Amino acid sequence: MSAAYYDTNYLLKLQITETGTAHVRNHAATVVEIHSAHHGRAEFASAAFRKVREGVATPADYRRLMAQFNADIAATAIVLLPLTDVILNRVETVFASAPPTTYLRAADAIHLATAAEHGFPEIHSNDKNLLAAATLFGLRGVNVIP
């Protein structure tokens, strides 16, 4: 497999040890590049900081996580895809026709639209709501964590 699209929770699992980390890292070892939406950079910073707030990481850990994440981006091991009007239009179109029971946050919709617009057939995540909405964007949702 040459490339895979990961949402932010999978990106975080590449850097910290928590439930599912081994499965995500094993999958990542099978791809050449990992892609994600550009807004995932802010989501990653927020998620890493949440670990500090929860007391499971220190400010030094946060700095290390961010340094490694940015190093992975610089090395193109993680490729951040730009947010465009085409992607936002796709988000709007999907919400306009989604069933009223759809639970989908804006940031997750941007991930799904970004993956779809860049031609990925699937998106990797363990977010149950994102995975449930994947088909609305013509994607297959994949969770490698059993």
Image (tube, rainbow, N blue to C red):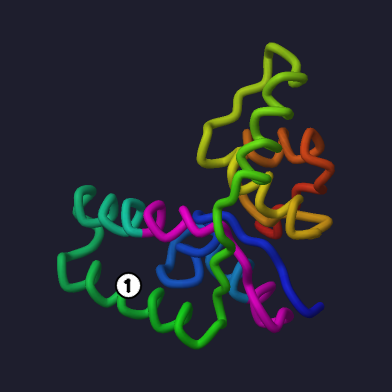
User: Which of the image's four quarters has the N terminus?
Assistant: bottom right
Residue farthest to the front, as pictured = 85
Task: Using the image, determine if residue 83 lies above or below residue 136.
Answer: below
Q: Position of residue 60 (x, y in %)?
A: 17, 73
Q: Residue 16 vs residue 85: left or right? A: left
Q: Which corner quadrant of the image does residue 93 belong to?
A: top right
Identified at 40% across, 74% down, the residue is 69
Residue at image point 28% right, 50% down: 50
Instruction: State the quadrant of the C terminus.
Output: bottom right
Point 50% across, 58% down: residue = 19
What's the magenta region? 26-44
Relative to 57, is 28 above or below?
Answer: below
Q: Position of residue 104 (x, y in %)?
A: 59, 29
Which residue is at the front of the view, 9 or 83? 83
Q: How many marks?
A: 1
Is 144 one of the magenta-colored residues?
A: no
Residue sticking out furthest to the top: 100
Amino acid under label 1? Leu
In the rendered image, residue 105, in percent from the top left (x then y), is placed at: 53, 31
Examine the rendering and report whether any part of residue 84 can be seen. yes
Q: Nearer the viewer, residue 91 or 29?
A: 91
On screen, residue 22 above or below 121: below
**According to the image, label 1 marks what residue?**
65
Q: Residue 62: percent from the left, percent from the top?
A: 24, 67
Q: Secondary structure at mark 1?
A: helix
Closest to the observer, 116 or 55: 116
